[in-house]
Amino acid sequence: MAPGQYSTDPKQHTLSPIVTGATVIGMKYKDGVILAADTLASYGSEARYKDVCRLKKVGEYTLLGGGGELSDFQYLSDQLDEMADEDWLNEDGCFMGPKEYSSYIGRVMYNRRSKFNPLYNQFVVVGKKKDEPAHLMYVDHQGTAFEENFVATGFGMHLGIPLLRNSWRADMSLDEAKALATKCLEVCFYRDCRAYCKIHIGVCNGTSVDISAPIPLNHFWGHGAWTEKRLEDDDPTATW
Amino acid sequence: MAGTGAGYDLSVTTFSPDGRVFQVEYAGKAVENSGTTLAICCKDGVVFAAEKFLLSKMLVPGTAKRIFPVHRRAGMSIAGMVADARQIVSRARSEATQYFNAYCEEMPSELLAERLGLFMHAYTLYWSVRPFGCTALLGCVDQETKKPSLFCIEPNGMVYKYQATAEGKGKQAAKTEIEKVLANNPELTCEQALMLVAKIIHKVHDEKDKDFELEISWICPASNYEHAQVPAKQRKAAEAEAKRILEAEQEDD
């Protein structure tokens, strides 16, 4: 455009997210892979939408967990649904699995960031396609993509990964894996200001993909450190 | 048969003195000379069947399909030039997908049928293109009400809504058979229709024609209300039963 001319196009680039999701935890277990995320979409520091499912079933075998900008997560979910429908139209008894979807999502994210118009998300793409080994991939808004046995996004990376490193085993049962994911999200709820005490857990076991009903987390606030009065009674400036 | 157009049949943009557009009628001939295909709205869904001629023993079974999925709960079976039909299937898929993207709701079947009618009709208006040499039987099941519906879209762009219909070589005989079936079984389910449909196709198959493969698919509770080919086991069982009954009927004659 000529010097001095201003663009009249609407600004299209999401460089700062507005409605965001927090941590997503993913881990493989003996028979497949699970994903867990809380049900909160924050509006900055406001805990605005408290019943959001941040896990999405993609195609037949895959689960997508999204942290970061919720609208971008929804947009990508719709695109992946359309892809899954086209996959289904082939009628060849063969559906795309987590490897295919996570590879595709990885490429989309990297290409978007290369155009300075990122999808502002941190995704965990998990799944198990029939007898193939379970698959777990982290993809984020920069286009970073890697496979692992367990991942966490956001604050979960700092609070949850240490717990996962201590306790994760390849032959964990489903209940053990769920308990470990729940524990990580509990710790996140205590220490992450943008986390919440209600979660979804999604399970991919090769035959089906199931997302649980919302699960409330246990949280305890009766610690002596919180409840005991520490300051002198006659100090008028003391508040607690 | 050739030459009855007497010069008025050279282009789709010419009417004959008696008000006919011969090129469109000739397109219909391509449909009439193809293998029979039929579709029935049953109580709990839609069943499609096609008599797929085998041009060679080397053909891999299950390929060169004549019945196509259009969307989760919509399928289309074709009479006539299947290569032409691929354009129509592709258009139907686009229409259905774009409608869903816009309205977050599955496209109503009558709307999809109307769009396809307009699409096929458009190709009868211009000198630079030719009409499609195929008829599409579009069968849908509504996602919420589970109500089945069936539309027949012809090369001239006309759209008819049917309870059940047939196209192709054996369409007259097939239609008669279908009427008998529906008169005897007004509450026909898709599972029950399998054998009856196999029987009709085998009955109207002309022995002088090539061997054929029965292609059969449905949208019903057994397929989770999604368009799916009938599982091979069930198809073979239905065909075997149909052949057995036909032989018994022939012996009676």
Image: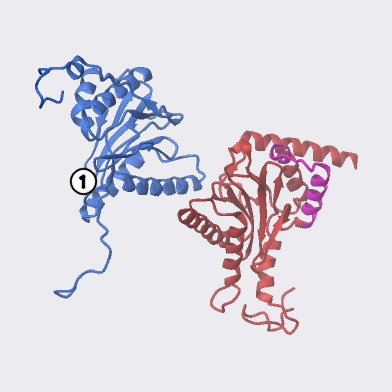
Chain colours: A blue, B red
What is the chain identity of the residue bearing mark 1? A
x, y percent for residue B28: 68, 67
Q: Please, what is the three-letter code of the amino acid marked with disc 1?
A: Gln
- From the top left corner, tell me how far across and down residue B78 is, in percent: 63, 56
Q: Residue A190 or A82: which is nearer the viewer?
A: A190
Extreme residue toward the right, this view: B253
Task: Using residue B97 as the reference point, say whether residue B58 is left or right of it.
Answer: right
Instruction: State the extent of the magenta-drawn residues as a range.
Output: B172-194
Residue B132 in view (yes/no): no
Let me know if residue B230 appears in the view: yes
Q: Write down the quadrant of residue A210 in the picture.
A: top left
Magenta run includes residue A116: no
Residue toward you, A79 or B60 = A79
Quarter of the picture containing the N terminus of chain A is: bottom left
Q: Is residue A205 depicted above or below A18 in this figure?
A: above
Residue at 76%, 39% (x, y): give it: B243
Q: Which residue is mark 1?
A: A142
- Say which of A1 and A224 sits in front: A224
Q: Is residue B192 magenta?
A: yes
Viewed as shown, does residue A65 lie left or right of B209?
Answer: left
Point 72% across, 36% down: residue: B240
Tell me residue A81's x, y (percent).
43, 46
